[in-house]
Amino acid sequence: MSESIWIAFGIVLIVEGAGPFIHPKGWRNMVAQLASQDDNQLRRIGGCLFVAGAVMILMFG
């Protein structure tokens, strides 16, 4: 189980690092747009991502 967690963490780092590595200008613009959102909008986005991740884990885990 411990090995699976490290593999999952590594995959997350690869996916998160792909955006700034492949298209840094577009990534910077996206981050700037997110930074300009109000707190409630960011909570909705975070909640949707959280639920989507939990559903994927339940389906494939």
Image (cartoon, rainbow, N blue to C red):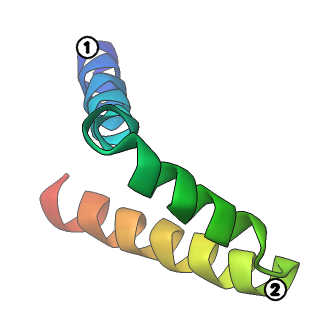
Mark identifier at residue 54: none
The residue indicated by pointer 2 is 40
Q: Quadrant of residue 45?
A: bottom right
Left or right: 10 with respect to 26?
A: left
Question: In whole angstroms, how far apart are the C-alphas of marks 1 and 2?
Answer: 36 Å
Judged by depth in the image, the label closer to the viewer, 1 or 2, is 2
**Extreme front residue here?**
25
For the residues bearing labels 1 and 2, Cβ distance under 8 angstroms: no
Give, as a three-letter code, the residue at label 2.
Answer: Asn
Mark number, residue 3: 1
Q: Residue 42 placed where, x, y %?
A: 71, 75
Asked which secondary structure carries label 1, the reply is: helix
Q: Residues within 10 Å of mark 1 (few under 14, many from 20)?
A: few
Residue under the point 41% across and 56% down: 26
Image side of residue 51 versus residue 5, left or right: right
Query: Relative to the observer, which residue lies in front, 55 or 25?
Result: 25
- Label whose residue precedes the other's in the sequence (1 or 2): 1
Q: Residue at x 38, y 63 (%)?
A: 53
Nearest the viewer among 9 and 23 is: 23
